[in-house]
Image (spheres, rainbow, N blue to C red):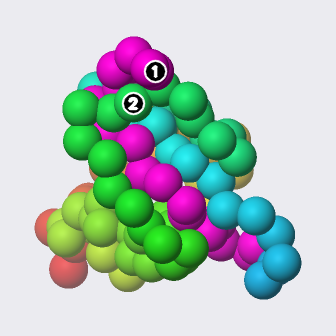
Amino acid sequence: MPEQKYSIVLRQCRLLGAIDDRPTVDIAIEDDQIVAVSPRISELGEREIDIQGKLVSPPFVESHIHLDSALTAGEPRWNQSGTLFEGIQIWGETQAKFNSG
C-alpha cells in the first residue's frame, strides 16, 4: 500500500493548454506549494481530491496590486533596468509629481 507523503494530491487534472486526448496528471502539494506534477503520483495525500479531468490553471487575475501605484506604469518613465532599486527611484519621482501638483 502506498505511503502518505503529501498534504494534498489533486487527481486527474487537465492542464491549461492540454489537448483533449492528452492524459490527465496528478498534482502533489506540500506546504502550500506544488511539489510534483506527474501522470500518476503513487504516494497518497493527507487529502485527495478527484478533479475528474477538469481544468487546473493559474488564477485568471493577478491579485497582487498596490492601489497607490495603479495605472502608473511608464509614468514618469519606464524601469529600463528592471531592478527593484530603479523601481524605487521611479516611484519616488512619481510621488514627487503627485505631491507637487
Can see residue 27?
yes
- Viewer-side label of 2, 1: 1
The answer to whether residue 19 is above or below residue 40 is: below
- The quadrant of the picture occupied by the C terminus is bottom left
Badge 2, how many Cα within 10 Å: few under 14, some, many 20+? some
Q: Is residue 15 left or right of residue 11?
A: right
State the image coordinates of residue 21 (x, y, percent, origin top left): 83, 78
Q: For the residues marked 2 and 1, what is the alpha-carbon distance in whole angstroms?
A: 6 Å
| Nearest the eye: 82 or 6 | 6
State the image coordinates of residue 40 (x, y, percent, origin top left): 64, 41
- Element class at badge 2: strand
Marker disc for residue 2: 1
Whether the residues at callouts 2 and 1 have beta carbons within 8 Å, the answer is yes
Label 2 vs 1, first from the N-terminus: 1
Q: Does residue 9 show up magenta in the picture?
A: yes
Q: Main secondary structure of the magenta part?
A: strand
- Element class at badge 1: loop
State the image coordinates of residue 63 (x, y, percent, origin top left): 30, 67
- The quadrant of the picture occupied by the N terminus is top left
Please tell me which residue is depicted at 62% across the width and 69% down the height of the picture.
14
Q: Is residue 12 left or right of residue 60?
A: right
Kind of residue indicated by mark 2: Leu
Badge 1, how many Cα within 10 Å: few under 14, some, many 20+? few
| Residue receiving disc 2 | 44
The answer to whether residue 22 is above or below residue 36 is: below
The answer to whether residue 87 is above or below residue 18 is: above
Q: Is residue 89 left or right of residue 4?
A: right
Q: State the residue lying farthest toward the front.
A: 1
**Range shown magenta:** 1-18
**Which corner quadrant of the image does residue 19 belong to?**
bottom right
